[in-house]
Image (cartoon, rainbow, N blue to C red):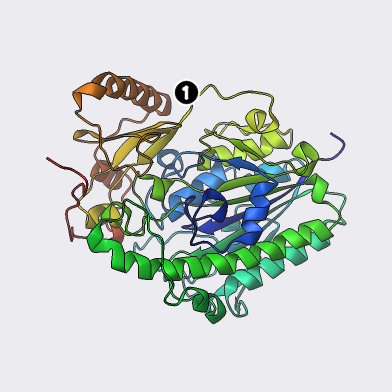
């Protein structure tokens, strides 16, 4: 390889894999995304193994699992001296840029105290160009900071459009450089609040009939439909944002030599299983879109790859695609041989699901921390009390028949338990009660870990 490829990594917040036109969601108005999918390697079983904002981002930055980097609940500060993805690429001659939502500076007060503060340069983890903000969900009135300037600035209008235009300018400017670049663009939507997309997109869904997933219980269907109108309006807006970035890559003259990734930090339940947002081990929460387009590798021919790529795997996989070594600190798996077609999947691969401590939605619904596996066919999860969930996703794609304790599936449950224990041993994960970790790491003062249970969740499909 004469020159390493450029990388443009675009990710949304809370965009579930099922909510894409190319995956058959009739509610979606995503022509640009669907066109990208038709010309990309579609990693169909990509997951967010710890499906919540900060843990995902910390794993993306470090290639490590949450109990290693320490960000296993929201707003914990990531070690600024970590070997980050920017530092890893910079060490091999890359220029690096980051635009949009950050959310790894943390708020040690446990009360979101840093979310609007300037993020010091050493906490920007080595990105040369950093135009971002810690966390803001007002997408029509959000600010950002630039590099080492502590002066707050404002994105113009709906921030995802302004951020995408800024990314396009970065791509055009750096396409002329002798150095390759890594650019990461982090959008805030379609994360709630749900009804704040630009009016033209909201109008598309006003009063529109929404096709709900089969696993939304009857008593949740009205609210789910109304919430999803806002969710899909955000998605339609982001589809146009995606077009801005894709056009910049095409016009830069470097499309052949650019790896373009589109994904999300995690999914969103939106009424499925009678649940609202994320943190849960069901597919709506953990499965994310993951498209890889690299014309020099596969031309304009799209294909599917059922690899269970997870957040810790992204850093080593991108380095591997560029022919670069991963740092010793990285725990994730390099899936670049499978993406290149140099190594075939065995069918035994599984993502490791892990939610080490209870906070927000788990507490609200009376659930406990968990560990599990999401394989190509099966989902298996246990909490501190023992086996909790087992689904055959091939025969039960909406996960409405929990097979835990079913004598006909006892052998399968035992096999998956053995596999899970092997993964725990590999991770040196002792799987202690969530409060043990919070006390160990002095995080018990965080408000998100002290939320009362509002409604103890029960399986809406259980018949006995």
| Quarter occupied by the N terminus | top right
Which residue: 80% across, 51% down? 255
Q: Position of residue 463 (x, y in %)?
A: 15, 42
Residue 148 seen by the camera:
no
Q: Nearer the viewer, residue 314 or 238?
A: 238
Q: Nearer the viewer, residue 23 or 196?
A: 23
Q: Is residue 231 left or right of residue 383?
A: right
Q: Residue furthest left?
A: 464
Badge 1 density bin: few <14, some 14–19, many ≥20, Cα 10 Å:
few
Which residue: 22% across, 48% down? 367
Q: Which residue is mark 1?
A: 348
Q: Position of residue 150 (x, y in %)?
A: 60, 73
Q: Is residue 294 left or right of residue 360?
A: right
- Does dot 1 land on a helix, a strand or a loop? loop
Residue 210 seen by the camera:
yes
Q: Is residue 160 above or below residue 206?
A: above
Q: Is residue 376 above or below residue 130?
A: above
Q: Position of residue 169 (x, y in %)?
A: 77, 66
Q: Is residue 391 left or right of residue 75?
A: left
């Amino acid at each position: 390889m004469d020159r390493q490829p450029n990388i443009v990594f675009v990710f949304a917040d809370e965009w579930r894999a099922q909510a894409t036109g190319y995956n058959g969601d009739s509610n979606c108005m995503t022509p640009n995304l669907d066109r990208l999918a038709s010309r990309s390697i579609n990693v169909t079983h990509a997951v967010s193994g710890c499906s919540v904002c900060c843990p995902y981002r910390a794993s993306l930055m470090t290639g490590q699992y949450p109990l290693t980097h320490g960000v296993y609940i929201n707003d914990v500060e990531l070690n600024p001296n970590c070997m980050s993805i920017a530092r890893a690429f910079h060490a091999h001659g890359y220029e690096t840029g980051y635009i949009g939502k950050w959310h790894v500076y943390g708020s040690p007060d446990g009360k979101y105290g840093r979310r609007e503060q300037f993020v010091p340069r050493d906490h920007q983890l080595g990105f040369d160009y950093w135009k971002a903000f810690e966390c803001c969900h007002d997408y029509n009135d959000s600010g950002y900071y630039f590099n080492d300037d502590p002066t707050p600035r404002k994105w113009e209008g709906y921030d995802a459009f302004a951020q995408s235009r800024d990314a396009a300018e970065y791509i055009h400017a750096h396409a002329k450089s002798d150095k390759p670049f890594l650019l990461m663009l982090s959008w805030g939507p379609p994360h709630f609040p749900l009804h704040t997309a630009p009016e033209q997109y909201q109008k598309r869904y006003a009063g529109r009939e929404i096709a709900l997933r089969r696993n939304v219980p009857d008593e949740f269907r009205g609210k789910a439909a109304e919430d999803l109108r806002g969710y899909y309006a955000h998605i339609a807006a982001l589809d146009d944002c995606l077009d801005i970035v894709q056009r910049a890559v095409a016009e830069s003259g470097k499309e052949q030599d650019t790896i373009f990734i589109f994904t999300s930090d995690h999914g969103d339940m939106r009424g499925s299983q009678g649940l609202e947002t994320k943190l849960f081990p069901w597919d709506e929460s953990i499965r994310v879109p993951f498209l890889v387009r690299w014309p020099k590798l596969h031309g304009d021919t799209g294909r599917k790859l059922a690899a269970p790529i997870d957040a810790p795997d992204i850093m080593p996989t991108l380095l591997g695609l560029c022919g670069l070594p991963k740092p010793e600190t990285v725990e994730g798996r390099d899936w670049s041989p499978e993406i290149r077609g140099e190594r075939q999947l065995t069918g035994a691969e599984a993502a490791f699901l892990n939610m080490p401590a209870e906070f927000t939605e788990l507490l609200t619904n009376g659930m406990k921390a968990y560990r599990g596996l999401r394989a190509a066919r099966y989902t298996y999860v246990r909490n501190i009390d023992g086996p909790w969930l087992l689904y055959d996703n091939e025969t039960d794609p909406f996960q409405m028949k929990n097979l835990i304790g079913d004598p006909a599936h006892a052998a399968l449950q035992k096999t998956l338990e053995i596999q899970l224990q092997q993964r725990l041993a590999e991770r040196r994960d002792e799987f202690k009660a969530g409060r043990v970790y919070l006390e160990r790491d002095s995080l018990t003062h965080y408000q998100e870990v002290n939320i009362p249970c509002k409604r103890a969740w029960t399986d809406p499909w259980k018949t006995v």
